[in-house]
Structures are given as C-alpha cells and as structure tokens.
Image (tube, rainbow, N blue to C red):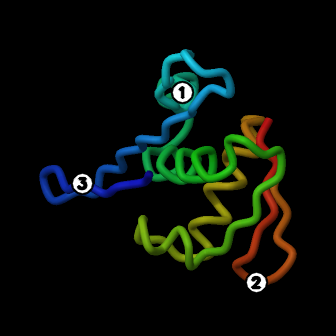
Amino acid sequence: MLTNSFFNDKLVLVFDVKLIKQKEGMPINKFQVPKDVWKDKRIPKETKYIYSYIYTKGFDRIITDINIGEIQQTIKIKNKGLKKSLDILEQLKYLVYQEYSTGMYTITLN
C-alpha cells in the first residue's frame, strides 16, 4: 500500500508493501526499496521518490508500464521532469525505460 504523509509541508512517501510467503508458517516480510538508492548522493531526492514508486509498483515483475498521470497523483511533477529523472536513473543503471507515447513509459528494473 502506498500512502502519503506530510512532514514540514513536504510530501513524504511511505511505502508499506508486504510480501506473503507461499508456504504456511513463514513470516510476513516487509518490502523495502534497496538502500543503495537512498544512499546514492548523485540522485536527487525527487528522483529517489520516483524510483521508489516505480520499484514498489513493479517489484514482482521485470517490466512495468506507467504513465505520468499515475505519478502525478503522488508527486507533483510534469512529464519533462519525469523524463529527466528517468534519464538519471538510466545513466546510473538502476533501470531502462522507453517512452512509447507521450507520458507513457515501459520500464525495466535492473
């Protein structure tokens, strides 16, 4: 589940996705975005939030389709800003993306 929280008038994204193990008796694990992304100083904060959204949406799949409208419900961003953030993440080899129509992207997580 993706929830929004406001902290000091800034949007803070809280990701709370739980994975349930196939076998009974196995504990429920909390899903977390890789810490490498949060520690990487080359990535702007807004881009980290975008990566977290993409990673959360497509964690169990190799390829994810998103559009700008989905992300705009969570983060205030325009298509040009999203494209710039995706370029940064692609250069740092966190993902590969392709824009197949204006504002619509196919993303492969690495």
Q: Give residue 77's position: percent from left, percent from top.
A: 48, 71
Please report contact status of discs 2 and 1: CB closer than 8 Å, yes or no: no
Q: Residue at x 69, y 67 (%)?
A: 66
Q: Give residue 110's position: percent from left, percent from top.
A: 80, 35
Dot 1 corresponds to which residue?
40
Gap in Å between the C-alphas at discs 1 and 3? 23 Å
Nearer to us of marks 1 and 3 is: 3
Pick the residue in front: 103 or 84: 103
Q: Secondary structure at mark 1?
A: loop
Gap in Å between the C-alphas at discs 2 and 1? 29 Å
Q: Residue furthest left?
A: 8
Q: Secondary structure at mark 3?
A: strand
Pick the residue in front: 44 or 3: 3
Q: Residue at x 56, y 79 (%)?
A: 69
**In the picture shown, does residue 40 fall above or below 15?**
above
Q: Secondary structure at mark 2?
A: loop
